[in-house]
Image (cartoon, grey):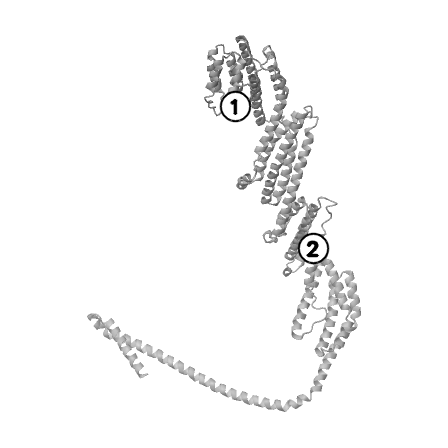
């Protein structure tokens, strides 16, 4: 301690020296030394005064504490003495307490007797109260009946509690009390039945007599309070009156839940046997009932229940659960395709729409986003799989039936109907695409994904259907060719079949545009076999069949061409033109894309048949005059055909004159008067028509009838050197013409 003080003194001196050094740094500051001394002296005096005051305060506190400790010690001694006196008195009074045991027993007995006397009036009036309570229940005065029931139960429970407290093992007296109040439990059950009946009709009662529902809720609340009080007492005494706890609030919600379930299940008024629309009707009744019930619950029932009951929330959950159970039951039945659609549409769309749970009258209490799905994703998936499987079978059957119905029309004695533009058609495309439309509209009500799947299915089945359509059209044509008199309107119905192909094309494009989203269109298109090719093939076969019909009628007249009869003035070409024009008056009812191709094909085929007549070597001109006359007739007939097909092709915007030019070119070879120029003329012909073969040239020279052996040999050898190259736009005419067997050697002879 001494060393510490010395160190403190040294530190103080060092600090003082430092402070003085800081104040006396310049010579002129020495004049203020006395002033500095007085200021430091004042500071020192102030510090010493504060220090003395602090020490004095500490001393006063210590003095006060010592005084209080002294007083406390005296108090402890006094208490110790008092406890000793109490202990002495207690030991002396033990014997006295034991002698008062009889008095104690008498006091307990007196207390029990006093309670019995006090309850005698109630005990004796129990039968009367029971009758009154029964009458009140029958009259529907539920609150008054419950008040009397509470009095009876209170008297019973009080007596049983006193007996339990006095002698809990005395079951005989307990049974006696319980038996005397035996009617009480029956009254409680009877009252409960009345409460449950009111709750079962609560949605009706709340509109007609809300006070009755309020009375029921008040009774349940009273019973809940009594249950809580008895359970609290049980923790202290272990005593529980018979029939407690009643748990009427819990039973109330059970009754409401059972009522909701019955309400949902009871809406099915029909079966499939009695009404094909049974499910639609059933679901619509459910929708109406549930919406009406929830609106009543929200607007009226909430006012009849305490807030902590959360009655609307509980009822909403009950209805949702009951609906989910009912939908599961319906989904497990053997539903038809249209019934599956009705169920899924209702579950996935109607339930959460403004027609039901999203109705403005239920907002904001009902949040659709928090509702669990009525059907699990697995069940929905199974239903969709079943629907797609059933729909596939149905579409196949529908398409087959539609085609069979259309085939029956093909043999009718009356012409097919025409559309607004005058084109023949049958009802087949309309029937098929109306069916597709109906199924796609139905699928769209369920989900976009199902709509796409149904569209893919329709396109797949359409592809298979068109193959069958093609086969049936081919059979139709073949049967007609076996007996051209039957059917009577073959041409008109074949035109309708051809036009149907164009309608199918347009309908497929329209269907995709309407029901396919842009982002998936490409994928679906790639996954579908192209139907355009099949439709074009059907139309091409149909057009070919019609042209076959034309050329069967032209066969006799075509056989007259390039014969002696023809040279002498046959009017075969006139008849050919009239016949073709007559047929094409009917063909005018073929839609433009196919009519255009058909006209071009008819033009080409007529020219080919004309050239075939030349190559058949039916005539051999014997003189220049005959050659000139024949060639000029060919030119005139070529112009006649040109005029006809220009007329038929008007409106198509295509130049089809090239076919008739071929007849003119062949006529020029025949007409040539100077045989020495024949090689040049034939070479020109071959260069223009590179598909001409040597047998064609041989036949042409044979018809001309004046080519020398050397000339024939030269021409043949030159042609064998290699065919000329055809232009890309050239349509071959000679390749389809077969020349009768006549080899070059015979020609040379």
Residue 363 shows up from this direction: no
Q: What element carries label 2?
A: helix
> Which residue occupies 73% across, 66% down?
147
Is 123 or 440 nearer to us in this picture? 440
**Which residue is pictured at 69% across the width and 87% down the height?**
100
Q: In this image, 389 relative to 63: left or right?
A: right
Q: In which quarter of the image is the N terminus?
A: bottom left
Q: Which of 275 and 288 is in front in this view?
A: 275
Locate residue 577, reporting x and y percent: 60, 17
Disc 2 crowd rating (10 Å Cα; few below 14, some 14-19, many 20+) is some
Q: Where is residue 17 in the image (x, y as percent from the top left)?
A: 25, 75
Q: Which residue lies under the disc numbered 2? A: 261
Q: Which of 394 and 34 is in front in this view?
A: 394
Residue 271 image label = none
Which badge, 2 or 1, is on the more N-terminal residue?
2
The image quarter in which residue 109 lies: bottom right
* Disc 1 target residue: 732
Instruction: Give the structural element (helix, strand or loop) at label 1.
Output: loop
* Image height of 456 relative to 257, above or below: above
- The answer to which of 193 and 437 lies nearer the viewer is 437
Q: In this view, does 684 lie above or below 473?
A: above
Residue 651 placement: quadrant: top right
Query: Count the marks: how many?
Result: 2
The residue depicted at 71 percent of the width and 61 percent of the height is: 216
Mark 2 vs mark 1, CA separation in Å: 81 Å
Q: Residue at the location (74% across, 45% down)?
A: 273
Tell me: 720 left or right of 503. left
- Horizontal and vertical percent position of residue 126: 78, 70
Above-or-below relation of 441 to 482: below
Q: In this view, does 624 lie above or below 53?
A: above
Q: Is residue 88 visible?
A: yes
Q: Where is residue 549 in the image (x, y as percent from the top left)?
A: 63, 23
């Amino acid at each position: 301690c001494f060393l510490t003080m010395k160190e403190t003194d040294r530190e103080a001196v060092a600090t003082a020296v430092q402070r003085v050094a800081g104040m006396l740094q310049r010579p002129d500051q020495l004049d203020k030394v006395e002033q500095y001394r007085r200021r430091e002296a004042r500071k020192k005096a102030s510090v010493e005064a504060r220090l003395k005051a602090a020490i004095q305060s500490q001393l006063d506190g210590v003095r006060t504490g010592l005084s209080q400790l002294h007083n406390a010690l005296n108090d402890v001694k006094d208490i110790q003495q008092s406890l000793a006196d109490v202990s002495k008195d207690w030991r002396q009074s033990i014997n006295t307490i034991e002698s008062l045991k009889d008095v104690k027993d008498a006091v307990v007995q007196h207390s029990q007797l006093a309670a019995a006397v006090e309850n005698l009036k109630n005990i004796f009036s129990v039968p009367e109260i029971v009758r009154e309570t029964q009458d009140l229940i029958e009259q529907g005065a539920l609150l008054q009946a419950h008040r009397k029931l509470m009095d009876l139960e209170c008297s019973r429970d009080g007596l049983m509690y006193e007996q339990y407290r006095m002698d809990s093992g005395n079951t005989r007296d307990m049974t006696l009390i319980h038996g005397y109040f035996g009617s009480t439990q029956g009254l409680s059950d009877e009252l409960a039945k009345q409460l449950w009946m009111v709750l079962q009709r609560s949605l009706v009662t709340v509109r007609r007599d809300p006070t009755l529902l309020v009375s029921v809720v008040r009774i349940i609340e009273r019973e809940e309070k009594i249950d809580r009080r008895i359970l609290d007492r049980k923790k202290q005494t272990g005593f529980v009156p018979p029939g407690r706890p009643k748990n009427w609030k819990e039973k109330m919600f059970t009754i409401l839940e059972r009522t909701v379930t019955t309400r949902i299940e009871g809406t099915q008024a029909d079966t499939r046997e009695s009404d094909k629309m049974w499910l639609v009707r059933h679901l619509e009744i459910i929708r109406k009932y549930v919406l009406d019930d929830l609106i009543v619950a929200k607007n009226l029932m909430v006012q009849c229940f305490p807030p902590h009951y959360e009655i609307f929330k509980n009822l909403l959950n009950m209805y949702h659960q009951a609906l989910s159970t009912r939908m599961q039951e319906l989904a497990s039945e053997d539903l038809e395709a249209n019934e599956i659609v009705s169920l899924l549409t209702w579950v996935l769309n109607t339930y959460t729409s403004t027609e039901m749970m999203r109705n403005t009258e239920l907002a904001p209490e009902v949040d659709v986003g928090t509702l669990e799905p009525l059907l699990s994703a697995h069940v929905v998936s199974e239903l969709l799989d079943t629907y797609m499987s059933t729909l596939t079978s149905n579409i196949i059957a529908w398409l087959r039936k539609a085609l069979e119905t259309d085939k029956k029309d093909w043999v009718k004695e009356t012409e097919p109907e025409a559309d607004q533009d005058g084109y023949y058609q049958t009802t087949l495309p309309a029937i098929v695409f109306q069916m597709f439309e109906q199924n796609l509209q139905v699928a769209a009500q369920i989900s976009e994904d199902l709509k796409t799947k149904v569209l893919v299915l329709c396109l797949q089945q359409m592809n298979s259907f068109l193959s069958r359509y093609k086969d049936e059209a081919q059979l139709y044509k073949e049967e007609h060719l076996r007996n051209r008199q039957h059917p009577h309107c073959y041409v008109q119905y074949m035109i309708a079949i051809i036009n149907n192909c164009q309608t199918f094309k347009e309908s497929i494009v329209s269907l995709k545009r309407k029901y396919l989203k842009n982002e998936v269109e490409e994928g679906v298109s790639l996954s579908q076999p192209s139907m355009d090719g099949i439709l074009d093939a059907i139309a091409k076969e149909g057009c070919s069949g019609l042209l076959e019909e034309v050329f069967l009628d032209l066969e006799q007249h075509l056989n007259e061409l390039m014969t002696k009869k023809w040279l002498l003035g046959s009017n075969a070409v006139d008849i050919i033109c009239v016949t073709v024009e007559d047929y094409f008056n009917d063909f005018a009812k073929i839609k433009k894309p196919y009519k255009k191709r058909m006209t071009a094909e008819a033009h080409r085929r007529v020219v080919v048949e004309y050239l075939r007549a030349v190559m058949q070597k039916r005539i051999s001109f014997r003189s220049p005059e005959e050659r000139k006359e024949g060639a000029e007739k060919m030119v005139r007939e070529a112009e006649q055909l040109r005029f006809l097909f220009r007329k038929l092709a008007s409106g198509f915007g295509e130049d089809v004159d090239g076919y008739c030019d071929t007849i003119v070119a062949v006529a020029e070879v025949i007409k040539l008067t100077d045989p020495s120029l024949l090689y040049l003329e034939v070479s020109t012909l071959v260069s223009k028509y590179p598909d001409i073969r040597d047998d064609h040239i041989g036949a042409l020279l044979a018809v001309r009838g004046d080519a020398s052996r050397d000339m024939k040999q030269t021409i043949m050898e030159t042609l064998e050197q290699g065919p000329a190259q055809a232009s890309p736009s050239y349509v071959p005419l000679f390749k389809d013409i077969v020349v009768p067997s006549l080899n070059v050697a015979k020609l040379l002879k």
